[in-house]
Amino acid sequence: MMKRKQYTSISLFLLMVVAAVACGNKSNASSQEEDKDKTETVNVPPFNADSAYTYVQRQADFGPRVPNTAAHKACGDYLAAKLEQFGAKVYNQYADLVAYDNTILKARNIIGAYNPDSRRRVLLFAHWDSRPYADEDKDPSKHKTPILGVNDGASGVGVLLEVARQLQKQAPVIGIDIIFFDAEDYGIPTFYKGQYKPDTWCLGSQYWGRVPHVNNYNARFGILLDMVGGKNATFYQEAFSKRTAGKQVKKIWDAAHRLGFGSFFPKEDGTEVTDDHLYVYNLRKIPCVDIINYDPKCDTGFGDFWHTTDDNMDVIDKNTLMAVGQTVLEVIYNEK
């Protein structure tokens, strides 16, 4: 009995020693992993604002990119070719969409997929069409004049083309989808006297939300860039984004402040905007953040040149393009 008891005691002692060593090893491994996480830095590529500016200018050179026009078709071909040049798997999604006045719009969503087989994905998007009406212009005679849409349209696309160029040079660990949505800006104009119709804006994203480019498409979250090139722009935290993607809003604004772009990204509440992110969330349940210029001192909230003939290259500032582009790169390259 004594021998068996002694054997049991020795066994218990050995088990305790083994357990202590195992716990110690586990603790050390955990500590080493934490130290690794603290010391491991992600190599985020530098955003080139000159390059982005060139892509904005190139779009403007086509003239107004209104659906059903030659300029629209030529610019669409250019954007698809650039994404392909930058290594994306390109999808062209063509659709006949009905505008507020029953005009049939020959629309085209342009999608570029990076690391398309990865299930861990982030969606980046902007609209590439320009508004057919300068209906906020102070001169009523210009209200039916198509706008160039340099800030409202081309700026977000220009930033994402530069992001695409960087993705080709240095692939992140996750999959990225870049979508240029069409027919975003063909909504009911202020001069329209007909019966009000809902959901006349963001027709391209509404279509994609119902018929995505791949079956059952999903992403962790999305980032919409809209009017991201204006001088002295301020990107308040848009209300719908904050309500449905609060975690991602915090992530993006914290990143901007770490990078020194706090003056562009005030941590203050903005207004709620009907924009492509609303339909991507409502139709695909992907939480999305709208990085959109908001000026609380302006009557429209979007700058005096918004939806006027003054939305041209003169309003674009490379510093704003840099603040937005580098922040987006910081976020996506730190996504695991």
Image (cartoon, rainbow, N blue to C red):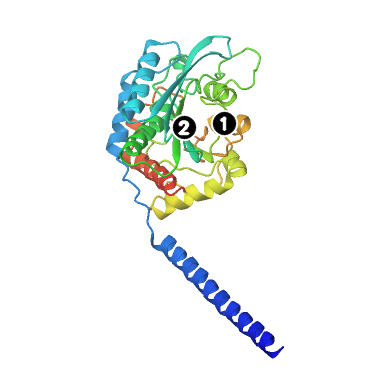
The disc placed on residue 304 is none
Residue 129 visible from this viewpoint? no
- Amino acid type shown at disc 2: Phe
Residue 46 percent across, percent down from the top left:
31, 45
The disc placed on residue 280 is 1
Picture residue at 36% right of the left edge, 34% below the top: 164
- Amino acid type shown at disc 1: Val
Image quadrant for the N terminus?
bottom right
Q: Quadrant of residue 15?
A: bottom right
Q: Quadrant of residue 304?
A: top left
As displayed, is residue 14 above or below residue 113? below
Residue 44 percent across, percent down from the top left:
35, 48
- Distance from disc 2 to disc 1, alpha carbons, whole Å, reads 10 Å
Picture residue at 53% right of the left edge, 50% below the top: 250
Picture residue at 57% right of the left edge, 40% below the top: 241
Residue 215 percent across, percent down from the top left:
56, 26
Seen from the viewer's position, the closer of residues 30 and 121 is 30
Q: In which quarter of the image is residue 49?
A: top left
Disc 1, SS: helix
Seen from the viewer's position, the closer of residues 24 and 152 is 24
Residue 270 visible from this viewpoint? yes
- Assess disc 1: are there few (<14), some (14-19) or many (≥20) residues with their C-alpha within 10 Å of its C-alpha: many
- Assess disc 2: are there few (<14), some (14-19) or many (≥20) residues with their C-alpha within 10 Å of its C-alpha: many
Disc 2, SS: strand
Mark sitting earlier along the chain (2/1) = 2
Residue sticking out furthest to the top: 103
Residue 237 percent across, percent down from the top left:
53, 44
Q: Which residue position is annotated with label 2?
A: 125
As displayed, is residue 72 above or below residue 267? above
Taking the image as shown, residue 189 lies to the left or right of residue 4, namely left
Picture residue at 45% right of the left edge, 63% below the top: 33
